[in-house]
Image: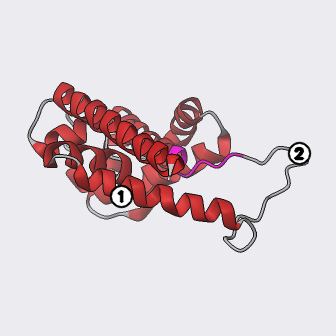
Amino acid sequence: MPDQSALIQAARDGDRQAFDELVRLTYVDLFTLAVRLTGNEEDARDVVQDAYLRAWRGIGKFRGDAQLSTWLYRITANCASTHLSRRRRNRTEPLLPGFEPVELAGDVLPEQATESGLDLARIGTAVDALPAKLRAVVVLRDVYGLSHEAIAEELGISVSAAKVRLHRARKRLRDSVFEERRSARAV
């Protein structure tokens, strides 16, 4: 069996069998790390597969400054982080036992659909009435879902300024929408 440095050099030169041997030598350690990072074996298998794919693509750039295992650990940790953030984004909640879905079509609940449409119109009017600085922050946060940091970067302001503007915008919207509701009900 050739030593690890010879296998690394052969893999860097494009030898798939040498890389396969490196996978065989390191798989248990990477899988164990992936299980610890993801919390389950199924996700760990996906992470390790992705890590080895990235390693194969990048083996030519491996300089040997660190040990191969350290390099592979870093790739695996990055893959696990990416996998977990993707899983969080796509997470679904199971329905409770006995849950019955309700049809919310406009023809089934016309009163609610009408009121909802009026509320949307009120909110749209209130957003349009906001000063541009406040409108930009509320749209970036509540419509596009950007973080305070991303809003600050996008608008060229500090994070605290983004938070303050968002607070002020929401307060104005709340006051405006509820005032319109009170006025509409009084008529």
Dividing the picture into quadrants, the one containing residue 121 is bottom left
Q: Amino acid at mark 2?
A: Pro
Dividing the picture into quadrants, the one containing residue 93 is top right
Q: Is residue 24 left or right of 60 when viewed as pictured? A: right
Report the front residue among 78 and 164.
Answer: 164
Report the front residue among 159 and 136.
Answer: 136
User: Dot 2, how many residues are within 10 Å of its Cα: few (below 14), some (14-19), or many (20+)?
Assistant: few
1 or 2: mark nearer the eye:
1
What residue is rendered at 71% in x and 74% in y? 107
Please provide percent x and percent y for residue 69: 39, 34
Q: Which mark is residue 97?
A: 2
User: Dot 1, how many residues are within 10 Å of its Cα: few (below 14), some (14-19), or many (20+)?
Assistant: few
- Residue 88 colored magenta? yes
Q: Is residue 128 depicted above or below 113 in this figure?
A: above
Q: Is residue 17 left or right of 166 when viewed as pictured? A: right
Residue 118 visible, this angle:
yes
Residue 22 visible, this angle:
no
Name the residue at the left extreme. 156
Q: Is residue 18 depicted above or below 44 in this figure?
A: below
